[in-house]
Each structure stands twice: as C-alpha cells, then as structure tokens.
Image: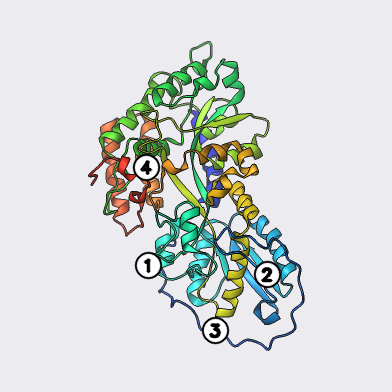
Amino acid sequence: MAKRSQFVLAAVIVLSLFLSACTAPPPVAAPAAQQEAAPAQQEAAPVPAVQGEPVGVGGDATGVKYEMKPSLYGGNPITLQLWDWHTPRVEYWEQKVKDYTKMYPNVTFEITQIPGEEYWTKLVAALPAGQGPDIYHFHNSNHTVYIENNMIEPFPVELFDPGYLKANWIGFEEGHFMDSEGKIRYIPYGSMAALVYVNQRMWDEAGLTEADYPKTWDEMIEIGKKLTKYDAAGNIDIAGMDFNGYIEYLFNDMNFQQGRYMYTKDGKACQVDTPEGRNSWNTLQRVYDEKISSPEFLGWLEAFGTEKTAMTWAWTWFSGYMRSTYPEIGFFTLPMPGFKGTELPSSGRQNYEVSLVVSPAKDLERRKVSWDFLHWLYSNDETLVDLALTHDVVPAYKKLWTNERVQAYQTIAQLATTIEFKVFPGEFPSTVDSALRQYIGQNFVSGIGIDQAMTEAQQACDQAMQEKSYWTVERTYLHNDAMIPNQP
C-alpha cells in the first residue's frame, strides 16, 4: 500500500496546482449587491496625447472590428489594475499590455498575481467597496454570486456583437455566458473535456494500429488486456489502462454517455444512483476484475508520467502538463469510447475557460479604457489562438478550428471534432465534487459494495445541492433530444 500513499500525496500536490489554474472555489459569503455602475469622477484637464503605433489592430472576432483611437482617457495618464491567479496567463498579459501601451502611451498597467483561494477572498472584499482591480480574470464556478451581486459589468454590445457571437462562437446559442436578462457577463477562450491518452511506444510495441482505436468500452477493455504486462509473480507491472484517482470524473462522463444528466431539472438534487450510474460502476469494475489495473496500483497521473500505464483518461490540460513535465514521453489522444460506439447521446462533460472581466465599481472613464483593452485583445484571431493553446482548450471562436497552429496541436484538433457532443452542466460546486470523490472514487478503490456506495453518494450530492441555489444549464445541451426523455 506504500505506492498508494505516495500516489495520493503526489496527486494532491499536482492536481492542486492544476485546479489553481482551472477551478476556483466561490467566496464563502456574498457581499452586498452593487449598483449597475459607479458615478463618473471628474476628469483632469486633458493633455496632448502622445501618438502611438498600431499593434494588432483590425481584428473582428467579436463581430465588431477593432480600430485604433486617436487617444484614450483624454490623453491623461492612467494605470489600470489587472488581477489574475494563473502564472502562464500573467506572463502572457505582461507581454500584451506592452503592445497595448505602444498604441496608447498614456495607458499603463499594474498586474497583480494572487494565488488560489486568496484571489477570490480579496476580490469579494475589494469589489463591493469600489476598490481592487479595474480588470480581473474570472472563473465560471463563481457565476451565480458574482452576477447576482453585480461584480461583473455586462459586455458592451457595441464592442461584442451578441448576434455574431451566437452564430460564430461556442456556447452562446445555449446562453452559457449570460445573466438572466441575456446580458453577456464573460466570454470563453474555449472548451476543455476529457480524452483518452495513449503511450505511443507501448501502443506500437503491442502491434496496434489505427484500425484498433476503440470506440466502445468493451473494445477499450480488450485493448487494455493486450497492453497489460505482469511480473513473474503475476502482479501488474504495466497497467493496460489506469484511472485510479480519476474514477469520479470518469463515472460522471459515462453517465452522460448513457443519456443521464447530472442534476435533476430543478437543480435541487443529483442523479447518481440510477441504472446508468450502476452500469458505469460495473463497467469500471471490469478493469479491476480482468486485471488490467488494480486498486493498489499507482494513480493515473504518476502512472502515465512514469510509463507504468499504457492508457489513461484526462482533461486536455494534461497535454501541457506532459509536455512540460515528461517531454521525452510520446503520446497521442483518442476520443472517449462510449457504450454504443457513437457520440450520441453524449461523449461526456465539458467546461469553459473564460475571460477577463471589468469591475462595474470603477468610474465610467476608467471602464471605457478597460473595455477598449478587452475589445482589442479578444477581437484578434492570433490572440485567441494563443489563449486557447495556453489553456489546452478548443477555441471558442469556431473559425479558428482550422487554424494552422490549432490543427498542429493534436489534442486540441482531436477534441474539436467531438466538442459539440460534450455537456456543460453549469456550476460544478466543490461540495458536489468532494461528495463524488469520497463516495464514488474512494469507495470504488476501497472495495465498498455498489449498493452502499451509490446510496452514500446520492445522499451526499443531494445535500450539497440543497445548501444553496446553483446555476445549472445542462439541459440546454444542443443534443438534448438524444438524452433520456422525461428525466426528473
């Protein structure tokens, strides 16, 4: 069991770093709601603007072409405060603000990086008081509390054309970035979901080819058998596939694949203990029963990185992790197998990486400059490609799916072919995540029986959903008609 203990520690450390980039827990308590906009402060007398040089102008990805202005803020000096928590993004902003200042020399930026939970704690304290950043990076796990308390200014339609975004970007047709009045509160860089990761050397050594790519879970298990290697004592030396430490997420994906949504229609309960949930559990159990992996084996993260498993499942952030941590290991990705060998009813869950937003608490003239900066950023195709590849996501702007750089990134090019079949459930509360991890993931590895595990998981998830109201939108899924009808 020493390996299991080492894995748990390693996985907690590495995944905590990932989650600091891709997830962020909502504030403990919501502040008092803010007014739609703060009154404008009196401007200083304008000074002559210094002529800048155009950089990256002319983009129209938002549906409105960006054009350089003669000056901003009346030519007066202004320093915008920008907050973020994710190091690669902060480094990118540092580069982009220099380009923007070349156009408008009177506009400078102060970028502050704040780690993890401290970021959201400081935001929720600063914004209602009219303090903190002009611009800050958002995460959709905080959708409800930040919108209900007006801590995000709606995107101006004169710069971000709703009709164009709906027609040309993912998620807008379903309303995934809007408030209850249809106002855009943030936009996506792109979407992330899970794929199968395969060790190229092990695949080749087993004599497998493209003709062997599995489309169903039955085929996946058979391929896993061919890739599994045992030591002289009959113990697993190299797992054909390994999902230890990822079971609860894979369980969730498998339920979607069978047409079962995650939540009830009223958003007050989960759908865990269902015929589909039990089928998912039993399918996963076959991997242990047929000795392709075992509960005592290494966790998926360590196992794939150290070449102790031939296949695993992960969200596409894992590609960047592998390239930076284990650059010597060759791998490729495959679409998630399903129960029917087709994408429908669904191929699993997805989530969006979303944008910078503007604080409504700042005065009007400062907000105008903030919005000009965001329009300049997000109207440019190459900037959007940069952000998609930085986050390992399919670009939200569908035109970019054929972009040369996107096509050269095998993981993202692959995910783009299946993203429309991924379900976005809305907010994914940390309490639900914890309940699934404990009562599905840990119970599965511990050998707890299916009846006890399902009962405990259902009760814990229901309790989590009833703690407060969450934003659930999974039934806006584009292929909702292919899901199980008349679900509770």
Give percent across and percent down for residue 252: 38, 39
Q: Residue at x 69, y 86 (%)?
A: 46
- Which residue carries the number 2 mark? 68
Callout 4 amino acid: Leu
- Which residue carries the number 4 mark? 436
CA separation in Å, label 4 and label 1? 33 Å
Closer mark to the observer between disc 4 and disc 1: 1
CA separation in Å, label 3 and label 2? 24 Å
> Alpha-carbon neighbours of circle 3 within 10 Å: few (<14), some, or many (≥20)?
few
If you read the primary sequence from the N terminus, does the residue marked by circle 4 or circle 1 appear first?
1
1 and 3 marks in contact (CB < 8 Å):
no
- Which residue carries the number 3 mark? 40
If you read the primary sequence from the N terminus, does the residue marked by circle 4 or circle 3 appear first?
3
Callout 1 amino acid: Glu
- Which residue carries the number 1 mark? 181
If you read the primary sequence from the N terminus, does the residue marked by circle 2 or circle 4 appear first?
2
Left or right for 157, reference 149 = right
Closer mark to the observer between disc 2 and disc 4: 2
4 and 3 marks in contact (CB < 8 Å):
no
